[in-house]
Image: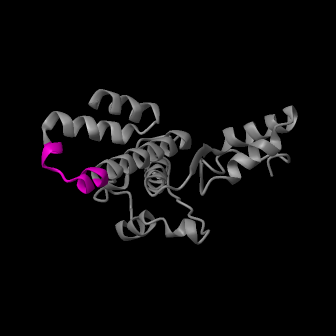
Amino acid sequence: MNDQTLQRLKQMKFQGMAMAFKTTLEDGRMASMTADEMVAFMIESEWDHRNNRRIERHINQARFRYKANIEHLDFETDRNLDKNQIMRFADCNFIDKSETIIITGSTGIGKSYVASAIGNQACMLSYKVLYANTTKLFAKLKMSKADGSYIKEIARIEKQDLLILDDFGIQPFDNQSR
């Protein structure tokens, strides 16, 4: 009976529930749980599993340059990072308010890393993020105009809650890029 239940949970794509069910069987917790507790535990496990997969999918689709997160930012170095300002960005309210953030500074101080950390935090909060090198993005848009997929490419960009343009302004824009 338990193997059949486990198989059916997997077939119905309830991976989180299947893992929770298997774990409670193996560690003997099932015997001490009421039916309500067991159902609540399995639903919570499924919820967590799906949420974690969504976050993982958002992070993979964002294509960040660095695997960075807010907790690993070094505020002690000579980078002039304002910890309070970065922490205000970490709640991602600027996304809901449609505000723009511009991170400036000398080459090599970690602007891309900070942008990746903020973007990663946005993914953790279930926002859709696209991290793009500006030169490569504009080249891709030029190509999409040539092959007829421009509208589709713009639609893909518009679906994002946060667009991070890295290395913006490093190369001059031509007339078509403007």
How would you classify the magenta stretch by its main secondary structure?
Answer: helix
Viewer-proximal residue, 51 or 125?
Answer: 51
Colour treatment of the image: one colour
Residue 39 magenta-highlighted: yes
Where's residue 89, x and y in %? Answer: 45, 65
**Is residue 172 at all visible to an observer of this figure?**
no
Q: In front here: 13 or 30?
A: 30
Q: Position of residue 30 (x, y in %)?
A: 18, 43
Which residue is located at x 60 percent, y 69 percent? 99
* Magenta-colored span: 29-40
* Residue 15 in view (yes/no): yes
**Residue with the most extreme front position:** 1
Say whether residue 16 is magenta. Answer: no
Q: Residue at x 78, y 42 (%)?
A: 152
Which image quadrant is residue 29 in? top left
Between 137 and 46, the residue placed more toward the observer is: 46
Q: Is residue 159 above or below residue 13?
A: below
Rendered location of residue 70, percent (x, y): 37, 55
Please give the name of the residue rendered at 27% of the width and 31% of the height, measured from the top-left corner.
2
Residue pictured at 26% horizontal, 56% vertical: 36
How many numbered circles does the render carry? 0
Q: Is residue 59 left or right of residue 173?
A: left
Give percent across and percent down for residue 133.
Answer: 61, 42
Residue 141, compared with residue 123, is above or below; it is above
In which quadrant is the N terminus drawn?
A: top left
Left or right placement of residue 30 versus residue 20 in this view: left
